[in-house]
């Protein structure tokens, strides 16, 4: 108990120095947590994907569509349980700044494949029976203040014209890792309208989502699907949903590496600052350490005091930094809108922040503790004189 009181008294001896050091640690730990959360958000879609679903797209690029007739052929491939259609819409809501994902889907089969999108039975029925109906995630609806029954106009970019949808449902996620910022409407409505305006663009879709009977057969089923359309006018590339999502992440891999590098550089910098603080503290107290040794306290006790003081400062700053990460992350997510559909501070990030605080405290104290433990009584008392 007396050791803890002595450590606390030493830590508060130079209040301004301690406060400034704690503030530096708070900033570093908070920045580290926010940067790691941004990296997690980038991978959130891939991490939330199911191993029981495949995505089939045009082998050339996502820009090119595939004939609707592929759906029936895919259903006949052994190991396939069901097939759903999905087509990126890319409409504009009010202004170009209001970006959010929009998909035309074959609603019954698609919703069966994604039980993590939770709708009430009434809302599901209303959506399925309304040709111009749509559903939106809870986060997206709250962002724009949408309510059930609202008319939502989207100005088409890929598909010209103004498309007006009636919001029939607001879905919640089965867990906090579920994307709640996507807008879905009926693929049939899109297809029927496009066939009237541009007949050649009808009966086409961007991707087929494939439900597997056995997730262990993902590789075999993928090869079988692609072999079915080999040498056709629109060859396919089939991959797991996670691999499909990671393909988008790979486009910004350089940015992710830079963010991860900066997050660790921040910790290294504050570690150096903390080490300098503890070195100054230890040099000022060589006389006190010598006195303690003269009274019979060993080298380990002296080192323990320095480690204790360093860890106390680091943990106080770390705890404050961790606490500050939550409101900062919420503010960042609100500012980004739907750019990061899934954005929350994970348990792994919290553990990394806590570990970083301990590492800062331990590393910063190593050299000062070693030097203080080795100081001779005569040299220490001479420093006092």
Image (tube, helix red, strand yellow):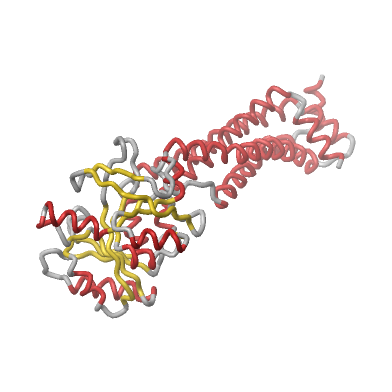
In the displayed structure image, the side of residue 75 where residue 283 appears, left or right: right
Q: How many marks?
A: 0
Tell me if residue 101 comes above or below residue 205 in the rendering: above
**Residue 285: x, y in percent?**
77, 27
Q: Quadrant of the C terminus?
A: top right
Residue at 47% x, 40% y is 333
The part of the image, by quadrant, that contains residue 294 is top right
Q: Position of residue 48 (x, y in %)?
A: 44, 58
Residue 108 lies left or right of residue 334; in this view the side is left
Drawn side of residue 319 relative to residue 248, left or right: right
- Spot the residue most to the bottom: 78
Q: Position of residue 165 (x, y in %)?
A: 31, 49
The vertical placement of 148 against 80, above or below, is: above
- Residue nearer the viewer, 143 or 97: 143
Q: Quadrant of residue 255?
A: top left
Q: Nearer the viewer, residue 8 or 236?
A: 236
Residue 221 against residue 376 in the figure, above or below: below
Q: Residue at x 33, y 48 (%)?
A: 101
Picture coordinates of residue 127, whole percent (x, y): 37, 59
């Amino acid at each position: 108990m007396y050791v803890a009181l002595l450590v606390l008294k030493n830590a508060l001896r130079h209040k301004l120095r301690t406060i400034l050091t704690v503030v530096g640690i708070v900033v570093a730990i908070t920045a580290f947590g926010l940067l790691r959360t941004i990296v997690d958000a980038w991978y959130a879609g891939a991490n939330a994907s199911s191993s029981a679903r495949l995505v089939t797209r045009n082998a050339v690029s996502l820009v090119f569509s595939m004939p609707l007739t592929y759906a029936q052929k895919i259903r006949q491939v052994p190991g396939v349980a069901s097939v759903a259609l999905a087509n990126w819409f890319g409409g504009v809501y009010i202004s170009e700044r209001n970006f959010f994902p929009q998909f035309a889907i074959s609603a019954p089969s698609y919703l069966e494949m994604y039980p993590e999108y939770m709708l009430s039975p009434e809302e599901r029925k209303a959506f399925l029976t309304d040709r111009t109906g749509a559903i939106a995630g809870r986060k997206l609806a709250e962002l724009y203040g949408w309510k059930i029954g609202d008319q939502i106009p989207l100005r088409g970019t890929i598909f010209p014209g103004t498309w007006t949808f009636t919001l029939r449902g607001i879905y919640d996620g089965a867990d906090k890792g579920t994307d709640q910022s996507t807008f879905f409407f009926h693929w049939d409505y899109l297809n029927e309208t496009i066939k009237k305006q541009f007949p050649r663009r009808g009966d086409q879709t961007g991707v087929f989502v494939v439900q597997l009977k056995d997730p262990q057969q993902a590789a075999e089923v993928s090869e079988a699907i692609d072999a079915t359309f080999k040498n056709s006018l629109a060859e396919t590339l089939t991959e797991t949903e996670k691999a499909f999502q990671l393909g988008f992440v790979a486009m910004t891999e350089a940015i992710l590496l830079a963010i991860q590098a900066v997050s660790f550089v921040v910790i290294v910098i504050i570690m150096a600052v903390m080490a300098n603080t503890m070195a100054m503290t230890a040099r000022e107290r060589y006389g006190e350490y010598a006195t303690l040794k003269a009274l019979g306290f060993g080298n380990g006790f002296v080192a323990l005091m320095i480690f204790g003081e360093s860890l106390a400062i680091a943990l106080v700053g770390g705890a404050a930094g961790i606490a500050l990460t939550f409101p900062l992350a919420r503010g960042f997510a609100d500012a980004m809108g739907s750019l990061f559909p899934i954005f929350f501070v994970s348990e792994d990030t919290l553990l990394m922040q806590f570990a970083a605080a301990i590492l800062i405290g331990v590393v910063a104290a190593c050299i000062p503790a070693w030097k203080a433990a080795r100081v001779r009584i005569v040299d220490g008392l001479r420093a006092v004189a």
